[in-house]
Amino acid sequence: MRSVLQNRTYRRLFAAHVLALTGTGLATVALSLLAYDLAGSDASAVLGTALAIKMVACVGLAPVIGAFAERLPRRALLVAMDVTRAASALALPFVDHVWQVYVLIFLMQAASAAFTPTFQATLPEILPAERDYLHALTLSRLAYELESLVSPVLAAALLALITYNWLFVGTALGFVASATLVLSVALPVPRPVERTGGGWAGVTFGARLHWATPRLRALLALDLATAAAGSMVIVNTVVLVRDHLHRGAGDVSLALAAFGAGSVAAALVVPRGLERFGDRAVMLPAGFMLGAVLALSAVGPAHGTAAWAELLLTWGLLGVGTALILTPAGRLVRRSAAPADLPAAFAARFALSHSCWLLTYPLAGRLASAAGTGTAAVTLAGIALAAATAAARVWPVRDPARLTHLHTALPADHPHLADAHAVPHGWRHAHDYVIDARHPRWPAPGRTAGAY
């Protein structure tokens, strides 16, 4: 992975990504303290609403922003979103009503819904080599997991010296530093997009791309499996550690760290596994693993050291399975979209994956409160196993990039048919196949791929 960091543009973008993640982590800690100051015992309700607002912003705005991102200079867009996030963070210490928190969180998350997919769509263009791009995905996964471990520790150290309001200043500085690094590099110019149907077609293209491409339908199902496992960890760890195992508050962090450690360990070995076995052979077993581990977690010992060790092992295994799915996900999207369509494709993935969390977050919490964490684990395990089964059914065992297909509506002199040969019902040829204006459906026996 050292070689990919020798690329100056990627190195600076990666540093910007890490700084923005660190700022977001500090804001998470500060927001919980701000909510307590504003709402007291109702702080959990405030935080829950803020989390829901974040998810709604991701799901609702990312496709819309992605449709416009195709037409905007990427560097300007990324810098503008960093500045928006910095301004929102700086405003948070001055709020005195809960509704103001909700507005600023919505603005911050709306900016993230534009920044993250655009950043993801840029990486394949500055790292065209498959191996380099895979290493970049691994580094991104490591950054996410290490941030979840480092930011709370950093926040705790800072809070020993300053009040929590200053953490929002640290958040803003992280976003400003990110914007500065983005400004220091030249980014690819957006490619012309060939698409019919007007503005609504642009907004919905990414979702239609995911639904029409078998491997991306499978990825969406696996996203649901990771959301089921991750929601169990994020929502119910504190209940399991404090109420069931009767351990201290510090052990909550250790349990979450076990999940992160498993994810980091798996992310480090993913590139070699993908090169040897391929995406499907790595990702599908990980989906079934998440369901099985969740199910087994509901029948373990109830108390004592054995239960604590089992929880750490279980959370570590869930981290492994999550990383085995999420690390290669960007490679599947890159493989399944034309370069000009990557912003829309990544925006749709951002929205669709967050919609899975929007479903599983409240489900994990409500089931644990109403029927116990065991019932929550079994239910989420069932969701994960059903999702993995669906992914296995829709993702073909043989999934080559190059597919032979038939066009029936393109004129004979169309440039796209330069290498095609005539057949009784149209023109047949083969190339790396993705859904676009000329290929709105996935080719199958007895079906055509032509759009016009």
Image (spheres, rainbow, N blue to C red):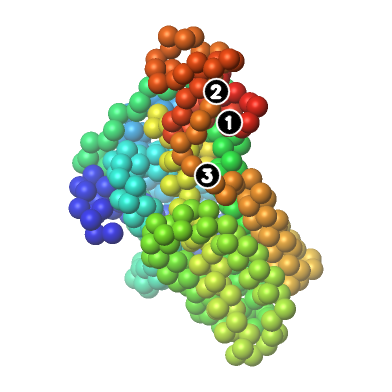
Residue labelled with disc 3: 399
Q: Amino acid at mark 2?
A: Leu
- Tell me which residue sits at (64%, 56%) in the image: 388
* Label 1: few (<14), some (14–19) or many (≥20) C-alpha neighbours in 10 Å: some
Q: CA distance from mark 1 to mark 3?
A: 12 Å
* Label 3: few (<14), some (14–19) or many (≥20) C-alpha neighbours in 10 Å: few
Residue 291, position in %: x, y? 65, 64
- Tell me which residue sits at (39%, 17%) in the image: 418
Q: Nearer the viewer, residue 276 or 216?
A: 276
Q: Amino acid at mark 3?
A: Asp
* Label 2: few (<14), some (14–19) or many (≥20) C-alpha neighbours in 10 Å: many
Residue labelled with disc 1: 443
Marks 1,3: beta carbons within 8 A: no
Helix, strand or loop at mark 1: loop
Is the N terminus in the top left, top right, bottom left or bottom right quadrant? bottom left
Do we see residue 124 in this rendering?
Answer: yes
Residue labelled with disc 2: 406
**Relative to residue 44, is residue 283 drawn left or right?**
left
**Relative to residue 408, is residue 88 drawn left or right?**
left
Marks 2,1: beta carbons within 8 A: yes
Helix, strand or loop at mark 3: loop
Helix, strand or loop at mark 2: strand
257 up-or-down from 367: above or below: below
Q: Amino acid at mark 1?
A: Pro
Q: Nearer the viewer, residue 26 or 224?
A: 224
65 up-or-down from 247: above or below: above
**Relative to residue 356, is residue 176 drawn left or right?**
left
Q: Which mark sits nearer the N-terminus, 2 or 1?
A: 2
- Tell me which residue sits at (57%, 49%) in the image: 397
208 up-or-down from 305: above or below: above
